[in-house]
Amino acid sequence: MLNAGVLQGLIDANLAADGARGPRRTRFSGCVARGVVNHFVGKPFNTDDSGNGKGGTGIGIGIKALSHGNMADIAYGCMDSHGPKARSFLSAIMRAIEQHLREATMLTTTNPQVGKGIGNVIVSSIGCVQGELQALIEAELIGDGARGPKRNNIAKAISTGVVVDVKATGTGIVTISGNVIPPGTSGVGIGTIS
C-alpha cells in the first residue's frame, strides 16, 4: 500500500544523496510525499480482463512502465526559472515517486466478466488529475509554513511531471480469482488504488 512516510524517506534520501542540505529538506520531502499519496489513494482505474468464468476479483501491486526521467523532464519544462541544481533535484524526487508507485501501489478490482484470469491496467485509465495533485502538494507546503514565491511553481512542476507520465504510460497487472464457469470470457474490470 502507498505510504507517505515511506515515500518521504525515499525522497529525502535521494535529495540528500544529490547534495540537498537545506534545514527544511525533510519537511519538504514530507509535504510532497503526503500530497502524492493522498492524491493517488482511492483513485479509480480500469483493466482489460481475460480468462474464464465470471464475477472475480483482482489484486496486484505496482503502477508499471513509468519513467522518472520523463517525469523530471516534464517537471523541469514547467518551471518558470531554474537554479543550478533544479534538474538533478527534480530527478531525485521523481526517482523516489516512480519507485514508490511501482513497488507499493495496491491495485484491487472487481471483474464482472472474468472469474479467473488476468487484468491489465488500461493505459490512461488511472484517475489522477494534475490540478488536484498540485493543490494537495501546495496545501501541504502552506500548512508546513512554506512562504517562498516559487511554492506554487514547484507544486505545479512536480504534479505535472507525475500525472502526465502516469496518464501516458502507467499500467499494471492484477490476478483475477473467483468463479471459473462458464469458460472463455473477457471484459473490463473496475479498480481502486490503495
Image (spheres, rainbow, N blue to C red):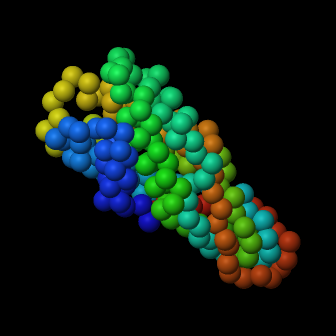
**Is residue 190 visible in this depiction of the protein?**
yes
- Quadrant containing the C terminus is bottom left
Q: Nearer the viewer, residue 174 or 12?
A: 12
Whole-percent x, y for residue 96 in the image = 43, 49
In the image, is 65 to the left or to the right of 92?
A: right
Q: Is residue 4 above or below residue 51?
A: above
Q: Nearer the viewer, residue 86 or 111?
A: 86
- Quadrant containing the N terminus is bottom left
Whole-percent x, y for residue 17 in the image = 35, 44
Whole-percent x, y for residue 145 in the image = 13, 38
Q: Residue at x 42, y 61 (%)?
A: 2
Q: Is residue 143 above or below residue 153?
A: below
Whole-percent x, y for residue 152 in the image = 29, 28
Q: Residue at x 53, y 56 (%)?
A: 102
Q: Residue at x 48, y 40 (%)?
A: 162
Q: Nearer the viewer, residue 122 or 66?
A: 66
